[in-house]
Every structure is written in structure tokens, then in C-alpha cells.
Image (cartoon, coloured by chain):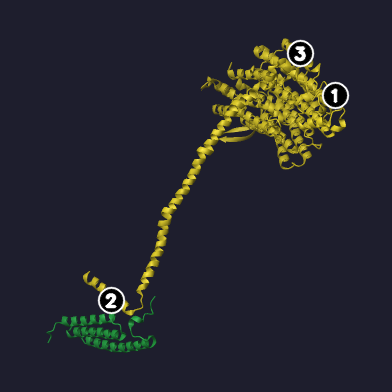
Amino acid sequence: MISIPLSWYLVVAAGLFCIGLYGVLSRRNAINVLMSIELMLNAVNINLVAFWRYGMLAGLSGMVFAIFVITLAAAEAAIGLALIIAIYRSRDTVIVEEVDMLKW
Amino acid sequence: MFNLIWLIPVFPLLAFALIILVTRDDKRLSTYLAWGGIGLSWVISWGVVVQAAFASEHLGEHPYQLPLFTIPTGSSGLTMGFMVDPLTAAMLFMVPFVCLMIFIYSKGYMGLDTPQVDPRYSRFFAYISLFACGMLGLVLSDNLLTLFIFWEVMGLCSYLLIGFWFEKKYADPNRITPKQAGLKAFLTTRVGDVIMLLGLLYLYVQTGSLTFPEIFSEHSLEGLAHATVTLPLLGTMPVATAIALLIFGGAVGKSAQFPLHVWLPDAMEGPTPVSALIHAATMVSAGVYLVARCFPLFSAVEHGPQLVVVAIIGTFTAFMASTIAIAQDDIKRVLAYSTISQLGYMFAALGIGGYVAAVFHLLTHAFFKALLFLGSGSVIHGVEHGHHAVAHHGHGHDAHGTHHDDHAEEMQAEFDANDMKNMGGLRHKMPRTFVAFMAGTLALAGIIPFAGFWSKDEILAHAWEEATLVWVFLTLGAFLTAFYMGRQIFLVFFGRARTEAAEHAHESPGSMTWPLLILAFFAVVLGFIGTPWAHVLHKFIGHAYPEGHFQPIVAAISLSLAALGLLLGYFVYGRRPLAQGQPDPLEATLGPVWTVLRNKYYVDELYQATIIRFAVWLSQVFYKFDDLWFVDPIVDGVGKLGRELSLFLRRAIDDPIVDGAVNGVGQLADWGGRYLRLIQTGRMQEYLLFGMTVLLMLLGLYLYL
């Protein structure tokens, strides 16, 4: 059942990564930035699973790696949201542009 | 005794040093130091003379030499030292003794025990001690170099001593001040010295030595006589002649012969002991000594012009100076011209080959001329004291009924104690001075049996045999000598006192009159060493020269002319003694000739108008060259150029480039920081943007390179 070429999966993953990257760089709301980060992580997952499925690497490494990434993503999302709530409580804003104390 | 000769100049030198450094403020001690110095020299000198005369054989051929030091010249050296030969011994007889007499006299003259003591008394004794050292060193030298050094020492002392009263100024601008006179003496003798130095250098180049035994050896003299030199105006002549003439130039300056005689009369501005010491007895006779010492050189060329030149200048000077002397009023100037004249006699004698006669006359002249000068000093001293007495106690002695105002006027105007017109009748006031002065006068005039007769007659006898023209002028000069001395005697000592000052003059103290009387003794007696029947001096120093023959006719002529001269002096000045204010009778007789003689043939004025004006002009030219146009502007210019260059370099390079670079680096850091910090906005998304952009660039680089 290997009729879809590997490169299609890789392109989709790359596309998703770029969309996620664009989102990280340009979204004003912090939660939107978090969501874009999740998107980038998912793109990486697709890459990993595609390479595992098409037998580029032996064993279970790809699948296990993907599960690690998902776990990390979940943890990081939780912490990220906690950080945003802490920032909101002290600065009364969630727009990343306005959190610019570490400057000249 | 001979091995002690080095001490002879050392004692006065020590006295000089000690007086200057240690005993300056103690006048009495300074006096005794000076006396001690010259006294010890005198004792040793007379010891040397005795040994030379009685205990030495053939001192002429084998003089005693004492080498003292050597100047290295390349691989060899010039050995200098002292020497005793008969000529030296003869000089050593005269010099320290006359100096001692003058030193003793100076104590009274400079007023040690009076309230008018000279403020620079000690310095005077220091200077005359240095001078004595110079003269003694000169006669003892065995080489021309140290002779020249001591010659110059004496020149220096001459300047210091003539200008001893340097602060004295006169109201009459034409009258030379002591300061000017000192300079004049030094500079005029300097002219002679330069010429002499040329001669010395030439001699050294030709013979490689300056020591007397070496340069007068047969070999050396032959070489000098045969080698010739060609000069632009004078043609070709033997080297010996050229050197002799150059050395004679030095003697002309130092012994005040024409044309360098102008300094000696003006040197009378110095204290009288100075005139006696330097300008009668010793320094001026150094010129004669020099020619006598170099006589082998002068006679090296047979019938050469050098001795003729010496004789001509000597005779001319002798005659010229005696004519000037008859028209002078200043007592010391008469004696000064007399000195010039007598020195001319000595050179004339040397020129015609009368070596012994010249030295004989040198010795006798030293004694009686020193005597005459010291006597004149005593007279001046007495008259000055008389002047003081009248000035201070004038109202007490007003026996003539004249007003006090007249006295005051006479005192306001400068009273010249030297002027013979202000004297008269002093033989009663100053008997001892009178006796001594008469002895000197008779000796100078050449009256038998006084010393001057024997020595002068020997010169005249030589002249009669060798060169009649010389004899004519010298004999005429002898007549004039007797005349002006007679004039002097009758103006000063006979007749009646012409001024109040002369009226109140008194005899000088013993310290002044005793040396006079001792010198008078020698003036009488010294001639006997050179009588034609027992010519002791000739045996002593003149063994190499033929003995002169006694010419009775010459003696008769000179004696009668001398007596005539004195008699004429009596007739003009003695029979009807001059009254106060009366003009000189000779003035009326001679008319314009008198004026010319009185003004010394205007030689000084001639020099002033030509040489001195030229020298001053030349110095102005050099001043302009040096300070105004060339040297200073160039030096200043270089300095300014350096400064401008440095300024330019600073503005062109240092400020813009170097400072610019250094400052620029700082500016760059500043600017960089100012703008780079703006990157740090604190916004995380922009950081990420940067990061991603660079990552992309690196990726592209990696993929395509």
C-alpha cells in the first residue's frame, strides 16, 4: 500500500511547519503563539512517522520518538499556559508585543 | 745654586697667588709677602750671577739647562725649561734688584701708613708680583714658547697696572683716561705680538724646535739662511731674514719703537712705580732682550736686511722721540719719550752689530731710568701733598693777600700734579729726591763718570766705525737728551715755586727715598763694568763678538754735546726761571715746529683717522653681517622654520590622521553601540524572526556552496 510517495508527506509536514512558524512570528496573542508552536510540533511528528513508515530507519525509533514529542508538546503546552496566566496576572495583557521589559 | 733657578719666578708667583686669595684685606701682610717674594728671587738671582761670573767656565758655549716639562708632539716632544747663560745672568743681576727697589718704593707711594692709602693697595702688590714673575720667567726661558707665554703675562699685567685707577675720569675729553690707556697699551703691543707669533710658528715649522740651543745650532742656522721664501711685495729672501723680521715686529711693539710707540707715553696714566717697573726697567727691555737672545738668528745671513731694518727703526725712533721730549710739560711724559729714545739706541746698537754695547746700555738704562721715574713719582707725590695741604688749610696760609675764592677756583679746576709748569724750586723742599734725580739725569745725559756715559759712548763708538749716518743721528739725539733733561731739572728743581702746591711740597718718606739713593749709587757706579780699559761685561757675555775700540774723538764729541745740552737747558730755563703762567720760551723760538713736537708729530691722530676708523668700520660691517643681515636672521629663520613645520605637521597629520584614527575607533564603537542596541527590543517574536532569517541564510549557504 505504498502508493503515495514519501515526498508528499514531507511537503505536507514542511508546509505545516512553515505555517506554524509564520504563526509564531506574527500572532499577537500569546495563546495563538502557543497554538502555532503546537502546529510546528505536529509537523515534526508527521515527518517522523512518515520516515518510520517508509522504512528509512530500522526498528521502532520513529514511533517512539513521535510519542516522546507528543508528550513533550503536552507538557510544554501546560507550562506555556501557566506562564501566560502568570504574565496576565502581573501585566494585565496577553499580547506578546507588550511584554518587552528585557530591552535597552 | 744653578739648580734653584726654577724658584726665581716661582716666589713672586706664590706671592701673587697668596695676596689674591688670602691676604687681600691685610695691606701690611700683602706688602711683606710681595717683598718676600721678590726678595727671595733677588737673593737667588744674585747667587746665580756670582756663580756664573766667578765659578763657571765657558757658560756661553755650554749654558746650564734645567728642563722642566715636555709637550708631546707626535712621536717626539718639545722640552721646555730654564737656562742660565751669561746674558741671562746679566739680566738676572738687574731685574730682581730693580724690582725690589720699586716694590719697596711702592709701599710709600701707595700710601700704606697714611690716610690716603689706595683702596686697592693689595691688588697692586699682587699685580706687580705677577709681573715680576713674568719678567723673570722670560729671561730664564730656554725656548721661545715659554718666553712668549711670559711675554704675554707681562702684557696682561701692563694692562692691569696701567689701568689700575680705572675709575679716574678727566674733564678734558681729549685727555686719555687710565682705562683707555691700558687698552691702548695692550692692543698696540698685541699687534707686535701677533707678528712675533707668526715668526715663532714659521721658525718652528722650519726647524722643528723652539729651544735656543737647538735653533741657534750651526746646522739649523745654515739651513735657515739657505732656504728662501718668496713674498708678494718683498721678493725672495732667506727664511732666516723673514723670521728675524717677524720676531723684531714683536720687539717693536713691546719696546715701543716707531710705529708702535704710541702706547708708552699714554701708559704714564698708571701709578709711577708701574711706569718705573714696566716702562723703564723691565718690560720694554724685554724686546731688546729678545733681539739680543735671537742675535745669532739675526746675524745668520751676511749683509742681510734684517739688521739694517733694526738699526734704521732704532735710530729713527731714538731721534724722533728725543725731539718730542723737548716739548712736553708732563714730567712723566718727558721720561716716557726718553725711554722710547734710549730703547732706540739699544736697537740701533744691535742693528750695527754692537751686541755687548746694547746689553750694556740696557743694564745701565734700567737703573737710571727706574731711578728717574721713581724720582719723578716722589716729586709728584710731594706736590700732591702740597696741593692737599693748601686745599685743606688754605685759609691758614693766605700770606699773599689773595681771596679765598681764588684758592677755591684753583682747587675746582683739575690740578695736574704731573705738570712741570706747576712745580719749581723743589730742590730745597725735597733734597734727597733732588740728589738722586740729579744722579739719574747726569747718567742719562751721558756725563763721565756716570753709568750712561760708558754705555752710550760704546754705542756711539760702534756707530762711528760701522755706520756714520747712525752715529750722526744718535749723537744729535744725545744732545737733545741732555737738553730736555736739563730743561726738566731746571723747571722742576730750580727757580721759585710756581704754585701754592709746589710751595708746600715736602720730602717723601724714607721708604721712597732710600730706593732712590740706592739706585743712584748704581747709576754712578755701574758703568765701570764696561770701561774700554777693563771691559768686564764684554768678557762675560761678548766672547763671541769682536771688542769695540775706544774712540777718543767720539767720546769727546758726545761729552761736549751733552754738556752743551745741559748748558743750553740752563740758559733757557735756569738763568731766568719761569714764573707762574709764563709760556715756554722755546715755544716762541720754534713756533710751528714746537706745536708739531708738542703734538707728537700727530701720529696718534693719524692712527685714529686711518687704522682705528677702519677697525671700527670693519667691526660695524661684521656687526651688520652677524647680527642684522645674515647670521642671526639665518639662525632665527631656521628656528622659525622648525616651529612652523611642526605646527603644520600637527595640523596636517597629527590632528586629522592620528587623532582621527584614535578618536574614530572610539566613535565607531559609540555609533555601533548606539544603533546595535536598538535591536534589543525585548520582543521575543522579533528575536525569533532574526534567528529564523539567519537560519535560512545558513541553510541556503549550506545547500548551494
Q: CA distance from mark 3 to mark 1?
A: 26 Å
Identify residue for label 3: B564
Identify residue for label 2: B692
Seen from the viewer's position, the closer of residues B439 and B388 is: B388
Say which amino acid is labelled 3. Answer: Leu
* Residue B117 point in image, percent of width and height: 78, 37
Rendered hue of chain B is yellow
Pointer 3 and pointer 1 on the same chain: yes
Mark 3 vs 1, N-terminal side? 1
Which circle marks residue B98 in the picture? Answer: none
Instruction: Report if the CB atoms under discs 3 and 2 are less than 8 Å apart.
Output: no
Which circle marks residue B428 in the picture? Answer: 1
Mark 3 vs 2, N-terminal side? 3
Residue B451 in sight from this viewpoint: no
Instruction: Report if the CB atoms under discs 3 and 1 are less than 8 Å apart.
Output: no
Q: How many marks?
A: 3
Left or right of A12 on screen, residue B688: right
Residue B70 in which image quadrant: top right
* Residue B3 point in image, percent of width and height: 70, 32
User: Residue at 65% of width from left, 13% of height from top?
Assistant: B469
Seen from the viewer's position, the closer of residues A96 and B662 is: A96
The quadrant in which the N terminus of chain B is found is top right
**What is the secondary structure assignment of the residue under circle 2?**
helix
